[in-house]
Image (tube, rainbow, N blue to C red):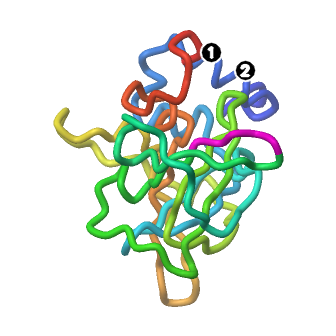
C-alpha cells in the first residue's frame, strides 16, 4: 500500500468508486481496509466493522414500525432528536434465529452522513488487525452476494483462533434493497 493511500483513506476510497478493480475482494481489502474493527456476533458467526463508523452502542428497544418497510427494517427510534432507522442484521443476513435477549444491542453507525442503527446479538470488543491478519474474501459464485465482505480477519489468542467476517457496512447499507440511501449518494 502506498504512503498516499495510508495517509488519505477517504481519497483512496473515493478513487476506488469508479474503478472496477476496487470491487475485487483482494484489491478492495488492500485499498481501503480499516485497521480497527468492532467485533459483534450474529448467531454463531463473528463479524467486524470499521470502528470509525460506530457512533455508539445502545441496548435494544423496540422501534416504531414503518408500514411497507422490508422485513429486516424493524422501524425507527428517536435518538436525541434524530429519527434513526433500525436494521436487524440477523434478518438481513438470513440468520436462523433473531431472538431479542438482554445481550441484544443496537450499534448506531454513521454511513454516508446518515445515522443508522443495526441490531446484533452481542458486541465483543475492538480489535486492531494488521495486514498479516486479514485474508481476502472467498471467491464465490454470482448467486452468493459477497459484495459487502471486505475480507476475513484471523485473530489468534493462545491456541484459539477466531475468524471474523470483515464487513463493508457502507456497501451493505447503501444497497438498493435497503432503501436507506439516496440513489445519487452511492
Q: Is residue 143 left or right of residue 45?
A: left
Residue 157: quadrant of the picture: bottom right
Q: Is residue 100 above or below residue 17?
A: below
Q: Is residue 167 left or right of residue 49?
A: left
Secondary element at image label 1: helix
143 in magenta: no
Q: Is residue 169 left or right of residue 112?
A: left
Q: How many marks?
A: 2
How far across and down, in percent of the image, does residue 117 sit? Answer: 61, 49
Count residues near mark 1 (Cα–Cα under 10 Å), then give few for <14, some for 14-19, many for 20+.
few
Q: Nearer the viewer, residue 62 or 26?
A: 62
* Image quadrant occupied by the C terminus: top right
Q: CA distance from mark 2 to mark 1?
A: 6 Å
Q: Which residues are magenta?
A: 81-85
How far across and down, in percent of the image, does residue 170 sit? Answer: 56, 35
Q: In the displayed image of the protein, which residue is found farthest to the bottom? A: 159
For the residues bearing labels 2 and 1, Cβ distance under 8 angstroms:
yes
Residue 15: mark in rendering: 1
Secondary structure that dominates the magenta span: strand
Count residues near mark 2 (Cα–Cα under 10 Å), then give few for <14, some for 14-19, many for 20+.
few
Secondary element at image label 2: helix
Q: Residue at x 27, y 42 (%)?
A: 139
Q: Nearer the viewer, residue 142 or 96?
A: 96
How far across and down, in percent of the image, does residue 155 sit? Answer: 55, 71
Q: Residue at x 47, y 50 (%)?
A: 74
82 in magenta: yes
Q: Is residue 112 above or below residue 85?
A: above
* Image quadrant occupied by the N terminus: top right
Q: Is residue 120 left or right of residue 125?
A: left
How far across and down, in percent of the image, does residue 160 sit? Answer: 48, 86
Which residue corresponds to mark 2? Answer: 11
Q: Residue at x 62, y 15 (%)?
A: 15
Amino acid at each position: 500500500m502506498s504512503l498516499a493511500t495510508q495517509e488519505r483513506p477517504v481519497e483512496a476510497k473515493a478513487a476506488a468508486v469508479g474503478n472496477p478493480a476496487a470491487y475485487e475482494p483482494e484489491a478492495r481489502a488492500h485499498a481501503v481496509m480499516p485497521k480497527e474493527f468492532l467485533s459483534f456476533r450474529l448467531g454463531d458467526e463473528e463479524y467486524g466493522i470499521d470502528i470509525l463508523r460506530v457512533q455508539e452502542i445502545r441496548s435494544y428497544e423496540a422501534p416504531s414500525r414503518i408500514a411497507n418497510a422490508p422485513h429486516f427494517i424493524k422501524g425507527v427510534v428517536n435518538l436525541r432528536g434524530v429519527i434513526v432507522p433500525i436494521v436487524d442484521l440477523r434478518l438481513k443476513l438470513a440468520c436462523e434465529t433473531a431472538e431479542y435477549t438482554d445481550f441484544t444491542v443496537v450499534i448506531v453507525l454513521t454511513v454516508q452522513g446518515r445515522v443508522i442503527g443495526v441490531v446484533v446479538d452481542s458486541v465483543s470488543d475492538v480489535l486492531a488487525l494488521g495486514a498479516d491478519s486479514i485474508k481476502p474474501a472467498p471467491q464465490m459464485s454470482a448467486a452468493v452476494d459477497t459484495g459487502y465482505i471486505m475480507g476475513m480477519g484471523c485473530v489468534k489468542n493462545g491456541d484459539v483462533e477466531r475468524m471474523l467476517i470483515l464487513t463493508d457496512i457502507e456497501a451493505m447499507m447503501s444497497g438498493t434493497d435497503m432503501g436507506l440511501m439516496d440513489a445519487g449518494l452511492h
